[in-house]
Image (spheres, rainbow, N blue to C red):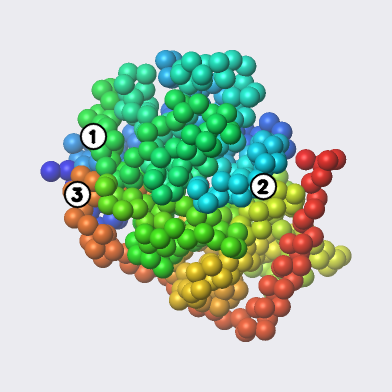
Amino acid sequence: MPDHVIAIDQGTTSSRAIVFDRSGRIVSVGQLEHEQILPKPGWVEHDPVEIWRNVQEVVGVALSRATLTRHDIAAVGITNQRETAVVWDRRTGEPVYNAIVWQDTRTQDIVDRLAADGGVERFKEVVGLPLATYFSGTKIAWILENVPGAREKAEAGDLLFGTTDCWVLWNLTGGVDGGVHATDVTNASRTMFMDLRTFEWRDDILEAFGVPRSMLPEIRSSSEVYGTAHGSQLLRETPVAGILGDQQAATFGQAAFARGESKNTYGTGCFVIVNTGEEIVHSGNGLLTTVGYKLGDQPAHYALEGSIAVTGSLVQWLRDQLGIIGSAAEAETLAASVEDSGGVYFVPAFSGLFAPYWRPDARGAIVGLTRFATKAHIARAALEATAFQTREVLDAVRADAGVQLPELKVDGGMTANAGLMQFQADILGVDVVRPVVAETTALGAAYAAGLAVGFWTGLDELAANWHEGRRWSPALDEDERERRMRLWRKAVTKSMDWVDDDVR
Ligand code: ADP
């Protein structure tokens, strides 16, 4: 009887494979970063072939570090960077272009063209999302419009689209040799093409985008057996039984199964998700409406989401582009070397501003600079930006849902930064709580897969696996908290209206 589940976490910066035991503890990890391809300002690409190669390698590493084989694995779960679009040839398995990553803003012209008739909220009632470069739809349209021969091939039925969950699933289950072309409802809900009520692709929207329906994967639930890993692979014959987009997976891994429960994940970007149960709630405050999870043929749970594009990637930028720190962890030491940000505010609107503003015309701004400011103040302002942006999203949640969150469950790489987590509690005025297993993204995918094959009995068993690891309580007085928020909001206004006909 297999005693483990493996999750493949195909993330923005790396691919990981993590083996979990029955109590939801990590047994072993394999991880490989992949190249961030940045051909022009605003363009971000990944090589799907490199991603698939890395996925296979990290699975091997995770299994061998735990001295396990496929016979010890009950099921495979997949979680993924969402929205990132891969288009490939179904006959050769070759991508026709690099994956266009969720952060990529090259499709703004396509957004503007579609919004000319009905505005950016044209499809929001049906799909829960405003028109934005962020979602997969315009990325697919760009490939069809710009890659020579792609449109003809797509119309002949030779091209397939998938987010990276779908790309991994197709390859894992055989690729050109009978690979399963499917995705789950959470990933489908980020394309702009799926009707939130019926979980079906909408022909009218596909037509507006010029995307043939034959390219699209079948939409399945988040927890069911999609197929088994193919012949020659390490995991051969193991059922692939769970798929959740990374943020939904983290919510599931945090055991936020019930209406009103929430989490914030601090990675490349930050993503707050609030479970709204079986109700579709439309936001009046810049939040997205999305699918939280759907287990087999049970009713779906929906969610409100606040997406913040740049948080951890700002720390990477300090390291790689500015060179003021040698590692992400050094950001904490540098920031802690000064008492506060010295009046400096850093608005990292590198891809415009996402929630709650949705302003593609914004660009990054460091304001409040005086001769006094040092690199330590800039590092501190960069970290604080994460906390301010999260507070603004939670204010939007409060306004939409009319509830005050009692505390915030957190996870993701940046939660290693205790100084930031303390500042987050200070600026929110509520406790911030991190579970023992902070790898909630992979854990959520493992849970979805394990549930489908009966490895775990139900949600109660999973909820009992959640244990508090660390808690931060607010220590800043309210006047100071609100003063900092007021200055932050003022800084945000300075980043707006930058992009115009002269600046893209
Ligand atoms: P993703 O899954 O989006 O790739 P992770 O959850 O692995 O992201 O988190 C990695 C991010 O966290 C990176 O952007 C990195 O810069 C940031 N990070 C990691 N450690 C720290 C730290 N100690 N302080 C601040 N940021 C950190």
Q: CA distance from mark 1 to mark 3?
A: 13 Å
The x and y percentages for residue 9 are 41, 43
Residue at 65% in and 38% down: 114
> Mark 2, mark 1: which one is toward the viewer?
2
Q: Secondary structure at mark 3?
A: loop
Quadrant the N terminus occupies = top left
Cβ at disc 2 under 8 Å from ligand 1: no
Disc 3 residue type?
Phe
The x and y percentages for residue 314 are 65, 52
Residue at 43% in and 19% down: 90
Disc 1 residue type?
Thr
In the rendered structure, find residue 119 and report the number of the disc placed on it.
Answer: 2
Q: Is residue 226 visible?
A: yes
The x and y percentages for residue 356 are 62, 60
Foreground: 3 or 63?
Answer: 3
Give the answer, above or below, for where 306 lies relative to 488: above
Residue at 56% in and 46% down: 123
Dot 1 or dot 3, earlier in sequence: 1
